[in-house]
Amino acid sequence: MTTKKRILTGDRPTGRLHLGHYVGSLQNRVKLQEEYDTFILIADIQALTTHFERPELIRDSIYQVAIDNLSVGLDPEKSTLVWQSHVPAIAELTVFYSMLVSVNTLRHNPTVKTEAAQYGYDDLTYGFLGYPVSQSADITFCNANVVPVGDDQLPHMELTRKLVRRFNDMYAPVLIEPEVMLSSCSRLMGLDGNAKMGKSLGNAIYLSDSAEDVAAKVKTALTDPARISVKDKGTPEVCVVSKYHSVFNATEYDNICEMCRNAQIGCVACKKNLAEKLNALLEPFREKRAYYETHQDQVRQIIEAGTAKANLIGNETVRKVKEAMHLKLD
Ligand code: TRP
């Protein structure tokens, strides 16, 4: 029995994970697993809410996302990987919780609204509108104490905490009210200057990209458009490459900005330097990835063992929930 507090966080398997995921959450997870009993949910049902027409993409991404997590240092001895669609407790809790939340509350959820606009939905499916309820089940089935998330997830956390309080007040105090641990890193912008690095935006560097891919992608990054020749003085504030230096090359950052402002370094050299720093970060991950890619059976075992452990905990939660709701004959 562990006395550590439990954290749960998750990824939607709709493709490979990228540097934005690394900076925003994976990096932090690797540290947190030392201190917390860590659960990482591979949220394939949530992925279906937007990608229901692409089930094979989701299936393939389950391995990809698991390998992305393992390759950056998630240790299967310390962290439990959970396959959402194979935890019936999550589905059951979702149904019970759905009685405690109004359609209007879900319609006003800012993240649901933003995503609906992004995907161009005007008539939302029941599953998509309700995914925050399912996310509350993700968090509570395993009694997570803490949920590390980015700020886009705050509306879902608020909903989860409200649902837990309503449930506990109305029936019996069986659910744990989770705390939010807000990611301290700001969002990593895309190579094209878009505020967000995103799979669908074509502006991402993937954790699985080769060193050559990384160098080639960095060459395409947006720089100061007013800086036409090396002799022109640059404005690092408007340059994506400088933003990346601040994240991935903090020690040289001030110096690089200074040289850019004085036209002492050109964009080509500056990008080459950044690509080297990114590749130095990614290289150890590539080694681990190569191992797991040739040992897929082991990845499968890690997922299955984690899911089995999750089911023991989830079944117990459902038992208590049903008892609290009088769904039990004495
Ligand atoms: N909604 C999260 C995302 O889009 C993924 C996720 C699913 C999640 N279930 C979760 C995050 C539970 C935290 C807790 O990134």
Image (cartoon, helix red, strand yellow):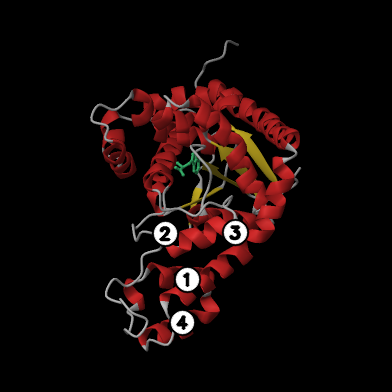
Distance from label 1 to label 2 (Cα)? Answer: 20 Å
Name the residue that disc number 4 marks: 256
Is 198 left or right of 103, judged from the image as shown?
right
Crowd class of label 3 (few under 14; some 14 to 19; many from 20; radius 10 Å): some
**Residue 66 position by quadrant:** top right
**Residue 199 in view:** yes
Distance from label 1 to label 4 (Cα)? Answer: 11 Å
- Residue at the limit of the structure toward the left, as seen here: 122
Q: Which mark is residue 211?
A: 3
| SS under mark 1 | helix
In the image, is residue 21 above or below residue 319? below
User: Of residues 103 and 280, which is closer to you in this image?
Assistant: 280
Residue contact at pointers 3 and 4, CB within 8 angstroms: no
Distance from label 2 to label 3 (Cα)? Answer: 23 Å
Q: Which mark is residue 136?
A: none
Residue contact at pointers 1 and 2, CB within 8 angstroms: no
Q: Nearer the viewer, mark 2 or mark 4?
A: 4
Is 163 left or right of 40, judged from the image as shown?
left
Name the residue that disc number 1 marks: 271
Crowd class of label 2 (few under 14; some 14 to 19; many from 20; radius 10 Å): some
Q: x, y (%) of residue 100? A: 38, 28
Earlier-in-chain disc, 2 versus 4? 2
Earlier-in-chain disc, 3 versus 4? 3
Is 150 left or right of 290, judged from the image as shown?
left
In the image, is residue 26 above or below residue 8? below
Q: Nearer the viewer, mark 3 or mark 4?
A: 3
